[in-house]
Image (spheres, rainbow, N blue to C red):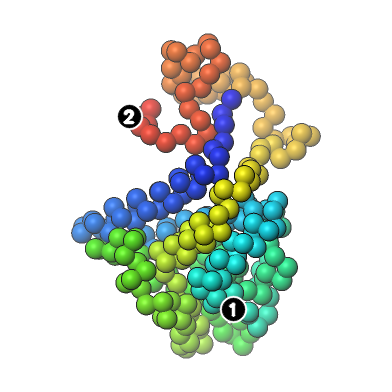
Amino acid sequence: MATQSDPQTTFAHITGDFRSAWDALSKDDKATNRGNFMFALQAMILLEWIMRLCSTDTNARDRFLGELNKIDSRYFTRLPAPGKEIDRELNPPRDHEWHLIWSIFDVIRNGQAHQYEQIIVTLPQKKSFAFSLAGGAELGSSLSQIPTKIDRKKYLGYRVESGHGWIYLHAGLLFLDIESAILSSNILCSGLNFPYLTRPRSAGSSHYKFTLTQLEQALIARGHNDLSSTASKGAGKSPYTATTIGPSPLI
């Protein structure tokens, strides 16, 4: 049966993918795109992941948020009115929707995931605001150099122009702040188990009501090739986990 990774492994995957992709792109002098939207989404995935990991431990959640507040308290700037509440499965703190970080999560995470652009927030009097994801993996700027290259005073700064407000973010610094708060809060050593999503969601669901044999028959009928290894076939073992990394069997 396919297995899920432990939290330490998943954290290494998320941060390793981000760092490797950023550093590779920062060395590519022919790249015309610098990945600012892609990296911002990955930073929000890390934020959602740590909140899900802490969803059964309020103390761990508060340690993480406390460390993030130490790094930059402006993440918790109180808005004039509440933004959108985040999923209760993430066990957000009380009145979280008033704080800037969760508007960043809502507008960037949901916008990038569903339309590959951040959501523009419509305000009264035909005004609006959004987050500007200025800068990605610029040539010559490895991820480790970002804290010294980005002016922290300008980060989370704002501009109001022609009835629109922009709040400036940098995907690399946002990611590093979240990563640093996770590490300094020592949550990965707390023995927490990640509450992985499941399908079907409930035993009585009508979704995915088929056997593995039925699935295999459907794939064969449409010309899908069987890539099962000789050693594993018939032994009931899979050579892959749910989160395999390494060489692709397709090459």
Q: Nearer the viewer, residue 1 or 146?
A: 146
- All told, the count of numbered labels is 2
Q: Nearer the viewer, residue 74 or 122?
A: 74
User: Residue 36: which quarter of the image?
Assistant: bottom left
Residue 120 showing in the rendered view: no
Is 111 rendered above or below residue 57?
Answer: below
Q: Nearer the viewer, residue 114 or 246?
A: 246
User: Residue 74: which quarter of the image?
Assistant: bottom right
Q: CA gap, disc 2 to disc 1? A: 49 Å
- Residue 197 location in percent, x, y? 64, 43
- Residue 40 location in percent, x, y? 45, 62
Report the quarter where the C terminus lies: top left
Q: Nearer the viewer, residue 101 or 112?
A: 101
Q: Which residue is mark 1?
A: 77
- Residue 87 location in percent, x, y? 68, 58
Query: Which residue is painted at 37% across and 77% down in the image?
Result: 151
